[in-house]
Image: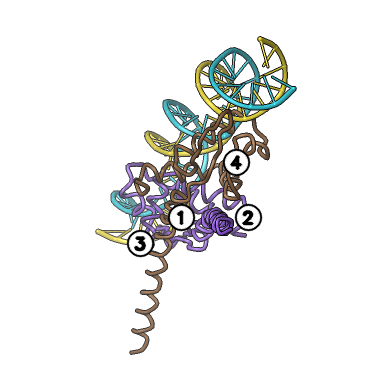
Chain colours: A purple, B brown, C yellow, D cyan
Amino acid sequence: MLHDPAQLDLMFQALADPARRQMVDRLSRGPASVSQLAEPLAMSLSGVVQHLNLLEASGLVRTQKLGRVRTCQIEPKALRAAEHWINERRLAWERRLDRLGDFLAETEGH
Amino acid sequence: MLHDPAQLDLMFQALADPARRQMVDRLSRGPASVSQLAEPLAMSLSGVVQHLNLLEASGLVRTQKLGRVRTCQIEPKALRAAEHWINERRLAWERRLDRLGDFLAETEGH
DNA sequence: GCAATAGTTAAGTAAATGCTTCAGTGTTTA
DNA sequence: TAAACACTGAAGCATTTACTTAACTATTGC
């Protein structure tokens, strides 16, 4: 479910916007309401809600509403999925370099 | 230089597009020419070049031209920077949860 | 030298994105 | 019960994005 390419698409899309990354950054320090998320951003509350909806659709943020306030939290599993995608590619590249190094070292020995 | 927010912006922006992620994926298995990158993509060569230029501007890919062929490689340092941004936020969240858990366990003990 | 190859650049376009304002809906508080 | 609060949704708009085609430059092979 988390490695579903469509979900990965939404996650990287969501992370591409600076305002949304700022929101994720804020949430990494603890839950927040929509207004609290909006406070440091030079943007209307409505704009923030739209960003938040994208973050939620991507799975990066989970929210729940109690009374009139919506509380937002990070979903670490989703962050881990994005992290993992990048990590796998980087490791594949680095392993390839290692093998190449070994090969060169061996052939040099003869 | 790699933690420069503008550069991070370009990197996440670059990773947001599926075609560009497919190019990074291809490159994680080894260097490739522009035409080789283009081959699996349902897109004109020109479109691929434009994506490639973004990838290069973001620092995720480095290229060099020999004769008429441009060879592309992944820049693992840049991948690591994006990875690191996500990782830090996720860990901040998880550490927070741990402290909360400890606190609850302690207060329950009395 | 001529043709094929590999890539580049510019111009145009349709769709997506990131906002805004404004007019709501429920929920608390005085 | 009325006003303040916390959000929500729709409509509109300027900009950016992801392409396309077409014309061009530089290599390489015959």
| Discs 2 and 4 share one subunit | no
State whether residue B30 is above or below residue B34. Answer: below
Q: Amino acid at mark 2?
A: Asp
**Could you tell me how far apart the alpha carbons at marks 1 and 2 are, in whole angstroms?**
19 Å
Percent x, y of residue B42: 67, 35
- Disc 1 target residue: B83
| Discs 3 and 2 share one subunit | yes
Mark nearer the viewer, 4 or 3: 4
State whether residue B22 is above or below residue D30. Answer: below
**Could you tell me how far apart the alpha carbons at marks 4 and 3 are, in whole angstroms?**
41 Å
| Discs 4 and 3 share one subunit | no
Q: Secondary structure at mark 4?
A: strand
- Disc 2 target residue: A4
**Could you tell me how far apart the alpha carbons at marks 3 and 1 are, in whole angstroms?**
18 Å
State whether residue B15 is above or below residue A59. Answer: above
Question: Is A56 positioned to the left or the right of A107 in the image?
Answer: left
Q: Amino acid at mark 3?
A: Arg
Q: Tell me if label 3 and label 2 are in contact, CB under 8 Å.
A: no
- Disc 4 target residue: B32
Q: Is residue B66 visible?
A: yes
